[in-house]
Each structure stands twice: as C-alpha cells, then as structure tokens.
Image (tube, rainbow, N blue to C red):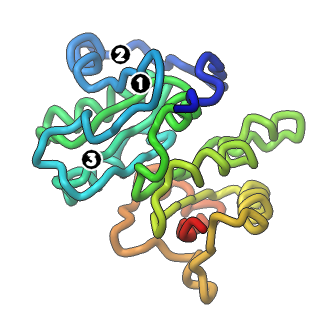
Amino acid sequence: MTEPAERSTRTVYGRRHGKKLRPARQALIDDLLPRLRVELPAAGYLDPAQLFPSAVTAGLWLEIGFGAGEHLAWQARNHPDTGIIGCEPFINGMAALLSRVATDDLNNVRVFDDDARLLMNSLTEASVDRLFVLFPDPWPKMRHHKRRVVNSETLDAMARILSDGAELRLATDHMGYCRWMIEHIAPHPAFEWLARGPNDWRQRLDDWPETRYESKALTGSKPVFLHYRRRPRA
C-alpha cells in the first residue's frame, strides 16, 4: 500500500492560542481533547470507521477550520448516526467545540488539532461523504495567497478522500477569495458545481445553520455559499 503523502509536513498559519482559557475550558482541553483527538497512524492509512461507536452508521463528514464549533455541533446533534471529524488548530476554538460536545453528549464527534492536510493525507480513499470549509481565513494579501486552504493541492486531497457523489460545501464573505475558489475548482475534473441560479450561492441550504460569524458577516459583505458534488470515479 502506498504511504500517505507528506506524512511529516506540518504548516499551520495564524494563531494557535488566544485569550487564556477559563478553568472549565482548560479542563476540557486537558481531559476531553485527548479522548476525542484523532491520532494518525505511524504507517498506512487511517480507517475512520474505527474512530466511532457502532451506532455511527451513516458515514463520515469532515469540517476543516470549525471556528467556535457552532456549525459542527449543530450537524452532530441533528445527525447522530453520522461521524464528524473537525479540524481546528486554534486552541480557543477547540475548547469552545469541546464545551458543546460535553454539554450535548455528542458521541459522534472527533477532532484533529493540527494541520488538516496531515489528516486528509492519512484518510483512506473515498472515506468522506461530506466536507465543509466554511469562512476560512481569506489571507487577502497576494503574498499570503499560498496560505489559502482551498488550492490546487488541497483540492486533489479532497477529491481523493471524498466518496463518489459526496458533497463539498464552501462559504466565504470575501469576494476575492470567492473568485479564487471558483477559479481553482472549475477546472478540476472531480468537482461539479451544483448552482443553477443566483439563489444557489446567495442562500444557505436548509441544513446549513447560521453561525455567529455569518451573522456578523451579514452586517458587511454578503456571504457566498458554494455547493459542489464529487463526480463518480472513472
């Protein structure tokens, strides 16, 4: 079996820590995070089915950069038979999600607090049924565009781990990044844009809850919601 690509490559941009955590949040980082953290195998690929209890039978979803975890926790509550992995290196955001997980007893959530590319490169092919990248940092300066999470390299990784017919959901309130994402995904053979009219990118899907970040964005630039499907493999 081919080894996962770039096993040792780790690049996390932006802050890892914010304000000092309150004692209760720090306790979640110390006690709950180790129990939910996804550990990458030293060799071979990670079978995500082994991460969750037997009650999780409806597949695997992945959210890259979950912020404070509002969207991820909502999806986990409303889809208890679906396993969801959230990637977020920002420790304060991780603590916020863990608080929601503990409060709502969300047994179908696992987390990865490092570079999401490491996880994607370690997952088995066609193992993810829905992937979210919602309001990622747009890195607006041209010299920082290489830091954008949606790029040719990560799209190849997403195409590999997404199952045939799987959904890729993206959102941004930065129009420059919106154009960037569309321009990078359009020529990629694995993805089909599902928009058929303006409302398909101006409005969230019914099962796409509004977060505090989105509410804040609505006071300024209008968010754009991009919905793609993973085309069947040849």
Front position in the image: 50 or 226: 50
Real-space CA distance between mark 1 and mark 3, rounded to the nearest whole angstrom: 23 Å
Query: Quick one: label 3, few (<14), some, or many (20+) residues within 10 Å?
Result: many
Left or right of residue 59: residue 125: right
Image vertical order of residue 226 relative to residue 198, above or below:
above
Front position in the image: 165 or 136: 165
**Which residue lies at the image location 45% right of the left edge and 41% below the top edge?**
124
The amino acid sitting under disc 3 is Gly
Front position in the image: 10 or 68: 10
Residue placed under numbered mark 2 in the picture = 21
Residue placed under numbered mark 3 in the picture = 83
| N-terminal label among 1 and 3 | 3
Left or right of residue 129: residue 223: right
Left or right of residue 212: residue 8: right
Q: Are marks 2 and 3 in contact (CB under 8 Å)?
A: no
- Image-quadrant location for residue 225: bottom right
Q: Is residue 2 visible?
A: yes
Residue placed under numbered mark 1 in the picture = 92
Real-space CA distance between mark 2 and mark 3, rounded to the nearest whole angstrom: 27 Å
Q: Position of residue 68 (x, y in %)?
A: 40, 38
**Which residue lies at the image location 17% right of the left edge and 54% below the top edge?**
81
Q: Are marks 1 and 2 in contact (CB under 8 Å)?
A: yes
Q: Position of residue 170 (x, y in %)?
A: 56, 59
- Label placed on residue 109: none
Query: Quick one: label 2, few (<14), some, or many (20+) residues within 10 Å?
Result: some
Image vertical order of residue 187 relative to residue 159, above or below:
below
Q: Position of residue 222 (x, y in %)?
A: 62, 67
**Which residue lies at the image location 67% right of the left edge and 49% below the top edge?**
156
